[in-house]
Image: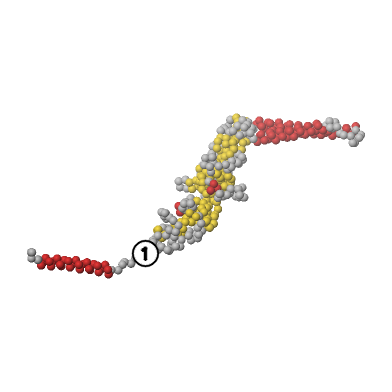
Amino acid sequence: MPPIDKKAMMRGLLAVAIIAAGFLIMKFLIMSRKAPKKIKPHAQGILVETVQVNPADFDIQVRGTGTVQPRNRVDIVPEVSGKVISVSPRFIQGGIFSAGEELFRIEPVDYQVMLEKARAELAGAELNLEIEKTRGSIAKKEWQNIEKDPTAPEPPLTLRKPQMKQAEANLAAARAAVRQAEINLRRTRVKTPFNSVVKEEYIDIGQYVKQGTKVGTLTGTDVAEIIVPVSIDDLEFIKIPGMGGVTEGSDAVVSVKSKDRLYTWHGRAVRLLGDVDPKSRMFRVVVQVKEPFKCLDSGTACNVRLAEWLFVDVNFHCGTVHNVYAIRRDQVRDNETVWVMDSNSRLKIRKVNILRYQGDTAIIDRGLEPGDHVVITPVTGAAEGMLLRTSSHNPGQQGVSG
């Protein structure tokens, strides 16, 4: 048996002792340590922005576009025939006339002769009537001398009563002929029926014009009209005379924008056309503008006019609604709902009534309360009761930003 190496044995025992001591120390530390304190995580909530809303008054406006057309238009047709002896220098396209001004004149000689002839025939008819009156008076006296019975009927032919009626009829016809001749003579001077601008003309001095032949077209300058297509939702707010007891239509501002200036005119809704536009299926409101050749901002004649076929913008002023809430259109959620953060920082999904969308604004008349905090931040998976927070407030506190 080989001798035992004491040094090696001591080293082995020392190693075992160290391991055992380490194991005991580790077990002691494990048994003596304290369990960590459990901390319940604090819910932060979804970070959102809100805006506080309160009821206010809001002006309802309906915007549209339309094309200008004159309220009055007339074709110039001479009522008598003859040679043109004078034409106004302004009777050309674009020429402006006041009511009653002369456009052109037809040679009046023939009609003066006809008037003189009619007056002569009138004088003859007046003379014939006087003669018949005298003859009738003489015939009546002679009849009374012959017929002693005062109750006997008077014979009409004997007393020349039919001749008297014929003479009276001839006199009436002669007077009518004089009036007609005077009218025809006046008609040789063709005048404008209203304030107007010349749209078309085709006449010149020396030209022979026939009665009933068109020689030009005038359009009125006192009143212009714009036909504005509007949707059925917008039509609800526009006042139309004669509808629902309305006597005066909604005010409207008609405008045309140039590069550096906005030209405006004051108008008013006057009627609704009896049908809808066959293409757009929209109702058509007629806006009337007085003095379309004068700009509203200057009050005097300007180069820009509400000329026929001009395309314009129309803004109807439809009155004021009271105690409504105005928010951005994109703050209205699906199914006409609005997200509101309550005093406990919880999400409330409110069903609201949209009175009207006006541009980017939604006007709400029911569903919101004064001081509500409307959530304007998109939230994925939003649900009733969801915890919310704002950037400047702790959870559980109500705040407004934006």
Q: Position of residue 32 (x, y in %)?
A: 27, 69
Q: Position of residue 325 (x, y in %)?
A: 50, 56
Quarter residue 43 falls in: bottom left
- Residue drawn 58% across the image and 43% down it: 273
- Residue drawn 58% across the image and 39% down it: 73
Q: Is residue 294 visible?
A: no
Q: Is residue 354 left or right of residue 16?
A: right
- Residue drawn 45% across the image and 47% down it: 260
Q: Is residue 183 visible?
A: yes
Q: Position of residue 22 (x, y in %)?
A: 21, 67
Q: Is residue 322 left or right of residue 165?
A: left
Of 392 and 81, the residue lying toward us: 392
Q: Eyeballing the image, is 322 above or below 156? A: below
Q: How is the image coloured?
A: secondary structure
Q: Amino acid at mark 1?
A: Lys
The quadrant of the picture occupied by the C terminus is bottom left
Q: Eyeballing the image, is 172 above or below 298? A: above
Q: Which residue is mark 1?
A: 40
Q: Eyeballing the image, is 224 above or below 333? A: above
